[in-house]
Amino acid sequence: MSVTIGRRHEKRYGALFTCLTTRAVHIELAESLSSDSMILALRRFIARRGTPRVMYSDNGTNFVGANKELMNIQEVHEKMKKEADVRTITWKFIPPGAPNMGGAWERLVRSVKTALAATLRERSPREEVLHTLLLEAEHIVNSRPLTEVDVEPAEAEGLTPNHFLIGRSCGAAAAGHFDDNVLLGPANWRTCQRLADHFWQRWLREYLPTLVPRRARGDPICRAPAEGDIVLIVDSSSPRYSWPRGRIKKTYPGPDNQVRVVDVETTGGVLRRPTSKIVVLVSAEATAVPCPEV
């Protein structure tokens, strides 16, 4: 990423932390890939989220260097060690050349990195705008539902990482709808909001495939969406932070008997969506109440 400072452009980096328990993400802006910059990002993370017990990462030189420097704090100054409160962290590294061993966090990290790269392609916003955009991206990712809640679509929302962080799924709605013309204007906050919309749209494209079960060649065809299923509508045209749920009211099979279009009944009305834009949360069979035996 790059930022505009006066008439020059400077590189900036994002340090992305993800919790393996709550699946929340935290993004810090870093000035360089140095160990010193990594330590500063870690200190900001600790100040806002608390001290983690265990940290996993790959063998990046900045991470390894940061770990060595943190472990040597005691040799530099015992008092500084106590104030830093980092020697209680156990830092574990996956083997070099084995990114698959970090699959628990790499898939989520990659979706965020890809969406940010696409959002900021050939753009160099001001540093304040970039910092705000990273926080907006963090909030977007943490608003995603984590659980398949067996409730009616109009009832309580599903659990999200934001529930663990701020007590609710979304802290604030989008500031408004802006087109790409604002990217050329002087209003930094409008520029940031438009970039956040771009991130939302691109990140959904990266995140949606992780929600749909993948079928290997030769496996039987997955169950098609059916009337009565409770589904999550995942559409980049939806407003930011919006994860609407509904119940399939009608299906439209094609000539090959495969369902590719459905009508979904939501609290805002009936929406017609392709099956590629919905995720089945609870099947109609699971929501059916069994009849008592006589």
Image (spheres, rainbow, N blue to C red):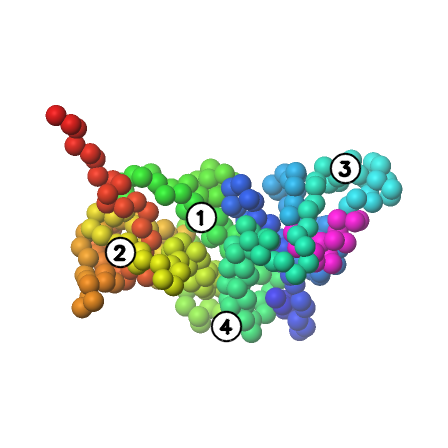
Residue underneath mark 2: 224
User: What amino acid is found at the position of numbered circle 4 in the picture?
Assistant: Leu
Q: Nearer the viewer, residue 231 or 175?
A: 231
Residue drawn 38% across the image and 59% down it:
215
Q: Nearer the viewer, residue 144 or 168?
A: 144
User: What amino acid is found at the position of numbered circle 2 in the picture?
Assistant: Ala
Which of discs 2 and 3 lies nearer the camera? The answer is 2
Magenta stretch in the rendered image:
57-69
Which of discs 4 and 3 lies nearer the camera? The answer is 3
Of pointers 1 and 3, the one earlier in the residue sequence: 3
Q: Label 2's element?
A: loop
Quadrant hosting residue 235? bottom left
Q: Residues within 10 Å of mark 2 (few under 14, many from 20)?
A: few
Q: Label 4's element?
A: helix
Asked if labels 3 and 1 touch by Cβ distance under 8 angstroms, the answer is no
Of pointers 4 and 3, the one earlier in the residue sequence: 3
- In the picture, measured across the screen, residue 134 lies left or right of residue 54, that is left
User: What amino acid is found at the position of numbered circle 3 in the picture?
Assistant: Glu
Which of discs 2 and 1 lies nearer the camera? The answer is 2
Of pointers 2 and 4, the one earlier in the residue sequence: 4
Label placed on residue 143? 1
Residue drawn 25% across the image and 40% down it:
287
